[in-house]
Amino acid sequence: MKRKRFAALCLVSALLLALCATAASAGAIGWAKHTDIVAKINGHPLRSYNIDGYTAVVAEDLRAYGFTVYWDADARTLDIRRAVRNGELVTPDPWPSYTPQPNKYPVGSRAQTIYSTNIVTFVAGRRVDGKNIDGETLVMMDDLAPFGAVVWNEKARVIELTLGDPVLLALRPQIENLESWKNTAGSGSGYDLYPAATGTLYVSRCTGTPHGTSTGMTYYRKDGTSLNIVDLLPSYGFGASYYCQPSRIEINDPGTRLTFVTPVQEYAEKDNAINAWGDTLCTVDLEYGKMLSMQPLAEGFTDWSLSAVPQAGDYFGSTLDLAVERRGADVSLIWAYYPGDGVRVEMNSREVTVATYASMFETESVYSQAILALRALDLPNVVRGTGDARATEKQLAEMRKYFRVQLNGEYIAGNPCWSQGSNHTDLTFTFDTPLALRDGDTLTVTVTK
């Protein structure tokens, strides 16, 4: 009886072990194999395996070799890019001291089980076939080509990545292809480069195509990724590249924002019609690859701001008198006369604020007398707790004798209010409705007596 019970227990145990083994191997899809090939980056070895005749390295190891390897647990993605700090490519200092050990196993023998995975791996923004080996990800050395030259030395049994500038590596074939096309079919083709702190914008024009001139706009980042700007525009006809005509191209100093003007066309499926926006100011977030806004220039700008601060070389007089004008995609100061360096003017689509510092009241200037006269009008005042009150029509009429805000020569409807800052008194004029500046509109601010 005991022997039968023991035999039964042995059978159950064997079945359980078999089931466990089957479950453990259910996710196995292949093998990473031992190799005598040494993988290097700039002459420095790192762990490597052989997968179907190709050399693969461990993605997580790349962090020590001048790369960022970002794991997003929510999105289940692994993103490999060149490391960039303060606009410069990072080179390890010191480099890792990994030394490949003599291979104790036959070349081609099984080293690690490759498991199925739902993790998506990106190298320089491009999806690649990453392999899961029990918590780590393998990527092919050839997939690292956007970061430099990958060279195989059969005699030395070494495959090496020599790091380069990802922007130059990406631009070179684009320019070569364009020049080749120019010499064969598109004589009017050409390109322009717009270097910035985080990369370079490449703008190309290809003539002689079946559908007319095709325009390309691609931002190549220093980390190896790129952003196709034209793809962010509305689709129409044969594609946005055939209506895109960029001008007034500007990239801000941090290299995070791009603005340009282009005609825009869009197919409205609901109405089966073409929407022609006309010249449109486009603003792109270069860091996150998003179109932030597209504002037709024929419409008024509803989101603008400007600071007017006296600087060396500015005109100084006895009153404050300045003008802001919208010219195309720009809202800029076209003239300014300051009563002294103790005045600051901040303006945007919602309000105009004139800050007067204490130093301005130490003189008997026309400006200081005008400010004192405005104070005597008992306008709404934040300090006194009347900041949410509305000035009377009589107060507004008196105010315009000393303080005027006008659009194209016409007074703007709004409400004044006093507030107190650090060593300065502020008079803010809030517009009743946001001020939408159209092309050619001029806004003037005057303080006088």
Image (tube, rainbow, N blue to C red):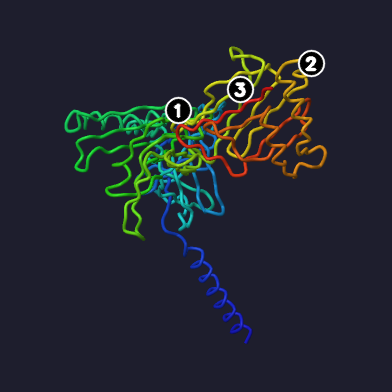
Residue 120 x, y percent position in the rendering: 46, 52
Q: Secondary structure at mark 2?
A: helix
Residue at numbered disc 2: 362
Residue 157 at x, y = what percent? 37, 34
Instruction: Verify CB contact (< 8 Å) between mark 3 and mark 2.
Output: no
Look at 34% across and 58% down and name the residue there.
269
User: What amino acid is labelled 3 in the image?
Assistant: Asp
Which quarter of the rendered picture does the N terminus lie within? bottom right
Circle nearer the N terminus (3, 1):
1
Q: Picture coordinates of residue 105 (x, y %)? A: 44, 45
Furthest toward the top, the residue is 313
Q: Residue 94: percent from the left, percent from the top?
A: 57, 26
Q: Is residue 379 left or right of residue 218?
A: right
Residue under the point 75% across and 21% down: 369
* Image: 335 above or below 406: above
Q: CA distance from mark 3 to mark 2?
A: 20 Å
Amino acid type for the residue under numbered disc 2: Glu
Q: Which residue is mark 3?
A: 321
Front of the two marks 1 and 2: 2
Q: Kindly report the distance in space between the C-alpha atoms of the residues bearing marks 3 and 1.
A: 65 Å
Q: Quadrant of the C terminus?
A: top right
Residue sitting farthest toward the left: 184
Front residue of 242/448: it is 448
Q: Mark 3 near mark 1, Cβ–Cβ under 8 Å?
A: no
**Residue at the (38%, 34%) spot, across then down:** 159
Task: Please name the residue that numbered disc 1 is placed on.
Answer: 43
Image height of 390 relative to 260, above or below = below
Secondary structure of residue under mark 1: loop
Q: Nearer the viewer, residue 1 or 372?
A: 372
Q: Amino acid at mark 1?
A: Gly
Q: Secondary structure at mark 3?
A: strand
